[in-house]
Image: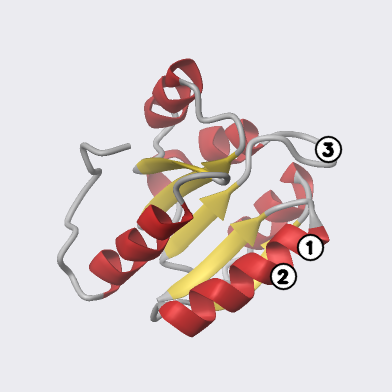
């Protein structure tokens, strides 16, 4: 499953890529540390991804801006991975088109399980657990 990650912390990005590629059928095809580079990559017709994983707070811009701009024409699945997975943030992300919201500190196993379910077709839409 081709995946694009928007994360500004290089250590978190490296660990996330390693974990996802080792434990799930995810192939990370690109990444960006800020909103403008993420949108440029996503808008390029030569780039393709099936899953977008976005952090909210970035070096510049916001993951919310990425969600807002990708809307219904973006990748098939959009998830948020953040340290700020409050009920308000979860609601805002869903309103902007996120399928799921995961907390970086406590829901990484749920993200891994989600990626596995999406890749093998067992998850056909937004889940009730996030």
Question: Residue 113: x percent and y percent?
Answer: 32, 63
| For residue 85, above or below residue 88 | below
SS at mark 2 in the image: helix
82 lies above or below 52: above
Q: How is the image coloured?
A: secondary structure
Q: Nearer the viewer, residue 11 or 122?
A: 11
Q: Are marks 3 and 2 in contact (CB under 8 Å)?
A: no
Of labels 3 and 2, earlier in sequence is 2
The single residue placed furthest to the top in the displayed view is 88
Q: Which mark is residue 25?
A: none
Rendered image quadrant of residue 72: top left
Q: CA distance from mark 2 to mark 1?
A: 5 Å
Q: Which residue is mark 2?
A: 14
Badge 2 vs badge 1, beta-carbon distance below 8 Å = yes
At 33% from the left and 37% from the top, the residue drawn is 130
Kindly indicate the quadrant of the structure image that contains residue 57: top right
In this rendering, the label closer to the viewer, 3 or 2: 2
Q: Residue furthest front?
A: 106
Mark with earlier residue (1, 3): 1
Q: Position of residue 105 (x, y in %)?
A: 57, 44
Q: Which residue is mark 3?
A: 60
Q: Is residue 5 visible?
A: yes
**Mark 3 → mark 2, Cα distance in angstroms:** 19 Å
Left or right side of 64 for 98:
left
Residue on which disc 1 sits: 11
Question: Is the C-beta separation of discs 1 and 3 under 8 Å?
Answer: no
- For the residues labelled 1 and 3, the Cα–Cα distance comes to 18 Å
* Image quarter hosting the N terminus: bottom left
> Which residue occupies the foreground of this view, 44 or 99?
99
> Please, what secondary structure does the residue beneath circle 3 have?
loop
């Amino acid at each position: 499953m081709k995946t694009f990650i928007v994360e500004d912390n290089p250590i978190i990005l490296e660990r996330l890529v390693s974990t996802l590629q080792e434990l799930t059928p995810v192939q990370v095809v690109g990444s960006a540390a800020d909103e403008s580079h993420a949108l440029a990559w996503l808008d390029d017709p030569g780039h393709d991804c099936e899953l977008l994983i976005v952090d909210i707070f970035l070096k510049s811009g916001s993951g919310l801006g990425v969600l807002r701009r990708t809307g219904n024409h973006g990748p098939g699945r959009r998830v948020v991975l953040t340290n700020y997975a409050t009920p308000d943030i979860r609601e805002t992300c869903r309103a902007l088109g996120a399928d799921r919201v995961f907390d970086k500190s406590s829901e990484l196993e749920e993200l891994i399980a989600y990626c596995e379910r999406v890749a093998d077709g067992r998850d056909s839409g937004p889940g009730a657990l996030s």
